[in-house]
Image: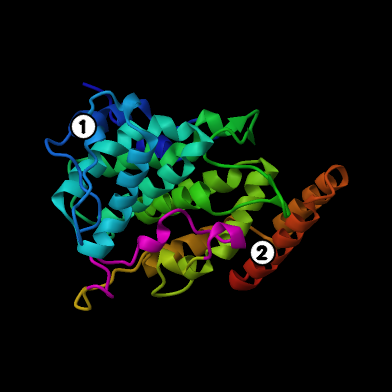
Amino acid sequence: MSKKIDRRRALLWEPGVGPDTDALHRLEKHFRIPAQPMGEAWFMGERWLYTDLLDKDSERWPAGEIGGAVNSLASGPGCFGLRQEWTDWLHFLVPRLLARCDDWRWADIYESLVTAFMAQYPDELAEYPYEGFLDDTLATLGRVPMAAANWKDGQIAGCGVVQPIEITRNGPFLSCGGSFSAALFLNLMYLDEEQVARWLASVLAIKDPIWRIKTVMWVAQSKPLLLEVGKQPLDLKYEPDWGSGWHDCWCLHGSNPAPNVDPSQVVLPFLGVRRQDLFRSELQQRLSQASLESLDAEIAEMEQAVPEMYGIREMLDLASREIIRDYLLG
């Protein structure tokens, strides 16, 4: 029998310590391949079936087939409500796709998997398939940003789904959205409330300055979900606007189907007031005006070697001022 997860250790984020192998094996063991192929989230005409995913060798699954299936898992519940076939395929696919999420080209797949999980379980107090399922999910799907592919010598390497500074035609860009944001919200939404403080402390303890900039920007850009009432991920700005949105997050409405499809649906908050209060309290203890000024000084030194950092430093300064105001930091 495989050992159970040490929950106190599993919830922590440590660079290079990615998905837990035992947890991954438990997920694979519990969820065998469904008997019938999964269908797309479209019912107006002849429905596409993802038959290639019935191949027992997941290495032979076409990338396009995977992308279409995962997108359907993310978007389908909001359009048509929960369907057992989507539930079964989500449980089956998650542990079998995580190995591919070590590659930056699979970032959209990872983000859609996170969205699909949130769509399937909009209530963190839902009934789950087996005891320990949520722990296993957070120790695998929730720890992908910590996988070794993302890190080298304690700094973001850019090989995995979490990217460092990206050079674009419009100059350097540093995202606080994408896989980075999806994983943060996955943990913040589903961790036991008593675990939130230790997990967030581990996130804020990561020393890489680029990671710290991303975190500060994420806190500022995620204000609708972290501080406001009644907001859903679809209210976030997306990455090109320096936002903290991620792939398919616009599919999350707080109910299945979405209220614009069925007005009788009760919409659940993405983050309840209790979780927002926990986050605010912990951030106030772990972050200060002095620590933000110290980070700015580090970036100023980097700017001497990389003048293009100026624009990113401006974004950091704006985010820092918003956080000091919104969280009443001293």
Q: Secondary structure at mark 2?
A: helix
Q: Does residue 165 appear left or right of residue 247 in this picture? A: right
Q: Residues within 10 Å of mark 2 (few under 14, many from 20)?
A: many
Whether residue 326 is situated above or below residue 139 in the rendered picture: below
Instruction: Answer with the quarter of the image where residue 233 lies.
Output: bottom left
Q: Secondary structure at mark 1?
A: helix
Question: Camera-side residue: 257 or 133?
Answer: 257
Residue interval drawn in magenta: 237-261
Question: Which numbered marker is on residue 167?
Answer: none
Whether residue 227 is situated above or below residue 307 in the rendered picture: below
Q: Position of residue 104 (x, y in %)?
A: 53, 37
Q: Position of residue 102 (x, y in %)?
A: 48, 32
Q: Main secondary structure of the magenta part?
A: loop
* Residue drawn at the location 43% of the way across and 48% of the way down: 111
Instruction: Answer with the quarter of the image where residue 140 lies.
Output: top left
Q: Position of residue 326 (x, y in %)?
A: 59, 72
Quarter of the image for the N terminus: give it: top left
Mark found first going from the N terminus, 1 or 2: 1
- Residue 88 drawn in magenta: no
Return the residue at label 1. Answer: 54
Labels 1 & 2 near each other (Cβ < 8 A): no
Q: Tell me if residue 284 can be seen.
A: no
Q: Tell me if residue 77 can be seen.
A: yes
* Residue drawn at the location 62% of the way across and 71% of the way down: 328
Kind of residue sitting beneath label 1 = Leu
- Residue 248 drawn in magenta: yes
Return the residue at label 2. Answer: 319
In the displayed orientation, state which residue is furthest to the front: 46
